[in-house]
Amino acid sequence: MRAKRVQTQPPAAPGVHPRRWWSFRPVSDRQAGDAIVSNFLLHWFPAKSFKASMAWSYSFWLGTISAALLFLLVLSGLPLLFLYIPSVERAYASVKDIEYVITFGSWIRAVHRVSAHLMVAAVFLHLVRVFLTGAYKNGVGQGQRRQWNWVLGVAMLLLTLFLSFTGYLLPWDQLAFWAVTVGTNIASSVPFIGPAVRELLIGGREIEQATLIRFYVLHVLFLPMAIGMLFAYHMWRVRKDGGLARTDSARLAEEKAEAPPSKSKTYTLLGIARGTAPQIRTSTLEARDTTVNSVPDLTRRIAIVILGTIAAVGILAVFVRSPLEEPANPLITPNPAKAPWYFLWLQEIVTDTTVRIGSFTVNGAFLGGVLLPGVLLALMTLWPWLDRSPAGAAGLWFAQSRRRQNVVFLILVAAVLILTVIGTFLRGPYWHFYWPWQPWPELPSRI
Amino acid sequence: MEHRTDSPYPKKDRPILAIVGVLLVVSTVLFAWSDRKHDWRYYQYAFKGQVAEKFGAEQAGTIPRGVQQIWVSEMRRADRCITCHQATLWKGFENAENPFKTHLPEPLKAHPIEQFGCTSCHGGQGWAIDAAAAHGPVEHWEEPLLGSQLGEAYTLSADKTALMQMNCNVCHRFDRETPGADEINLAKRLVLDKGCRACHVINDRGGTIGPDLTWVGDKAPEQYEYGRLSGQKSAFAWHVAHFKDPRALVPETVMPNFHLTTREAQALAMLTLSWRRAPIPADYRPGLPRTDPQTPEEVAEEQRMKTGPGAWFVKTGCFVCHSVASLGVKSPAQIGPDLSTAVEDTQARFGRTIDDFLREPTGTMAVVLSRQIVLTPQEKAVAVQKLREAFAEHQKQKAEGTRPEAGGH
């Protein structure tokens, strides 16, 4: 359906908005701006968007993709909430029912699972993009605190991982039980407090009903709530910081080839923005070759990304089956017992740093499971304050002044990815190495 | 005049958005299709046709449509086999091919389908509604259908469908012999003949040289050592090979080679795998002791009463409520009056002779004698005679002053 073209009436009185409706096909810039002011869902966008920020090749829209996946997860989680039973006696059977007899059940569960895995990947890639473009750096705008938005992002990555990890246990099959066993055992290798941490996490000393209800409530209530609040804060900070870091580098380039200053207009967004945000300076507002109206050009792209993500996940979910293994059995450890894939680089380090000298074993769980990820996480969180490169490097892919840190970062990312691939695809029974063309030993069956 | 800034985006982005729209339609069609493409729709359609052909359209109209299941709450089983196997309880399809075949009526008499479902006997995955997942063998499901296909894969010496007897014996493990479970019966005889209990505990009885076998069927397939087993790696194959030549699989074992035939080894493997703690309600297991044991004194007392002068009252069941103190019968409950003085009592209480009272009893005795202890006129005459004897004995003991204490109200 085509949106109706609406003719603009001049305001009846100052401060009174002339129309209750707005158009996706505005006839004027003013009407385009009307959409932002009068639509609740659009009010968090600027009236004008930088072309440079909207380029596919700058951000790859990874943040929007992550948000779309989060939206899909909430949406597909709602029907599962009605069908899944968080009890050790019934959880497995209820998931079997979802898989086999609930109308669209197996597709809904596959959407949930595929989105969850993709979200871990998308959020991680988003973080990589932000690092490589130096987008956690403050540029030329006033009141920018991009370093804090980076910290929020790191927190959201951790929440995403924890959300996925808590969801892993819920089907109560062998995969779930042993992935959580491996994960929580790594946590217990923290010196002194480790065992207590594990006990707090699983609500006792064994993975049982207490663990299931704990993970369930975290998974369906607290963690989604936390990630939702951080998401809102993350978006708000993006506006407060004057949009993507790309706008700052674009503005710097523009100032070098400075045109004569034009009349200056200052907008404050509902009175909450301090100072003048760069994207609404008159000079940029009037610079028609660098900006476009957010409605409909930005909204159209957002629609492409969100709907495209939904379509891709919807199609993938038809073909990617969500496996359900044997019912959880604490007495039988599957061989190999693997953590969720995004923790496999850690499990790989744990096994590689576990050294056996004769009968003496140095357990690598502390080094690989606690110390190394802890140091990496701390470094990552603090990096915006450690990065001393000039403001001009903000929002530029592979800026000259940040070359060395980008190289080190890429090496670390490559190491994590390679270890993840090894752990996921190349490790077989007893954690022995198998090339993809080498068959694993035949798994025994009962009959 | 207000104007709108030119934008380069619509030209490129609109076609992309259109493609995304098409993809959304494709995804909708795909998932709707994937939810509908199940073979059971065809089977239900075909069965309906067969019934219509054989019994008319009206009968065919009574066949339920959609996914069907038997829910056995005692065993927490939801068996959806009847979604395709709709002929299970229909008469007239005895010679048809599966899934359109009538179930053999004999086993269902003792094992009603509502109480046992399908998978507790046949194996398979009751939750599933597609043949591959329901019948197996399929990854991540350890209980495949115990049918002739699997029997052929194992080249069973006996009837190819015999593997199912494993599941019979999960409940029937305490039976000496179970009708219809020939292989299991053979294996149970072998357990006795070969003296397995010399070394192994089975059902809490036996030697401790070998491992306890009471629940050996619960051992996971991963817990066997397959290093020396050639061919298929499964717990069943392991047991068959092990029974034939224990030392070939476990070199250090002291278990002797009994030189069993293939059939015997397979039967024993089925028996051992059936010894499992399946989640079955207690009353599904025949042979479980369901009485609280009596003390030796109680057993001796009962034996004495059964052979003493009051044996008739014990045998007939009077003693459940009544003592007959003069004849040494003591009721465990003592709900009714002592029958030693019944001849007097009926006169005193009802104003009737004992013959008359027994012929047309009133009150509680009317209920008991019409339902629980039904006596023919001849038996009633015997009862009167016995009661008179008891009264005579009572009076004799009273005269001698040796009347034993007896309860009664």
Image: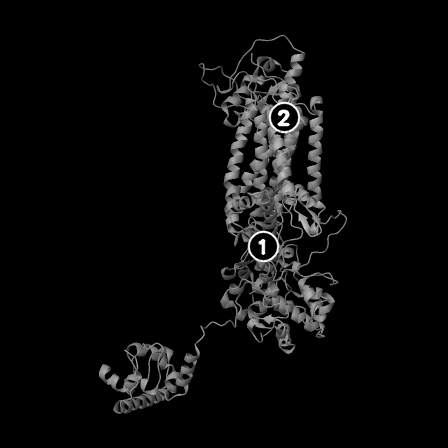
Q: Nearer the viewer, mark 2 or mark 1?
A: 2
**Count of residue discs:** 2
Does A98 sit above or below residue B383?
above
Residue B340 image position (x, y, % from top left): 30, 86
Q: Is residue B31 left or right of residue B240?
A: left
Q: Residues within 10 Å of mark 2 (few under 14, many from 20)?
A: few
Taking depth in this image into account, of B308 and B118 the one nearest to the observer is: B308
Q: For residue B315, what is the image quadrant?
A: bottom left
Vertical comparison of B51 with A249: above or below: below
Q: Which residue is label 2 attached to?
A: A386
Q: Nearer the viewer, residue B54 or B242?
A: B242
Residue contact at pointers 2 and 1, CB within 8 angstroms: no
Q: Amino acid at mark 1?
A: Pro
Q: Is residue B191 visible?
A: yes
Task: Work out which quarter of the rendered image holds the N terminus of chain B and state it.
Answer: top right
Q: Residues within 10 Å of mark 1 (few under 14, many from 20)?
A: few
Secondary structure beneath label 2: helix
**Which is nearer the eye, A33 or A124?**
A124
Residue under circle 1? Answer: A330
Asked if A292 appears above or below B175 in the picture, the reply is above
The single residue placed furthest to the top in the displayed view is A260
Q: Which badge, 2 or 1, comes first in the chain's sequence?
A: 1
| Image point (58%, 31%), residue name | A153
Q: Position of residue B259 (x, y in %)?
A: 72, 75
**Residue beneath the point at 66% across and 31% down:** A128
Three-letter amino acid code at disc 2?
Leu
Residue B277 vs residue A268, the one in the foreground: B277
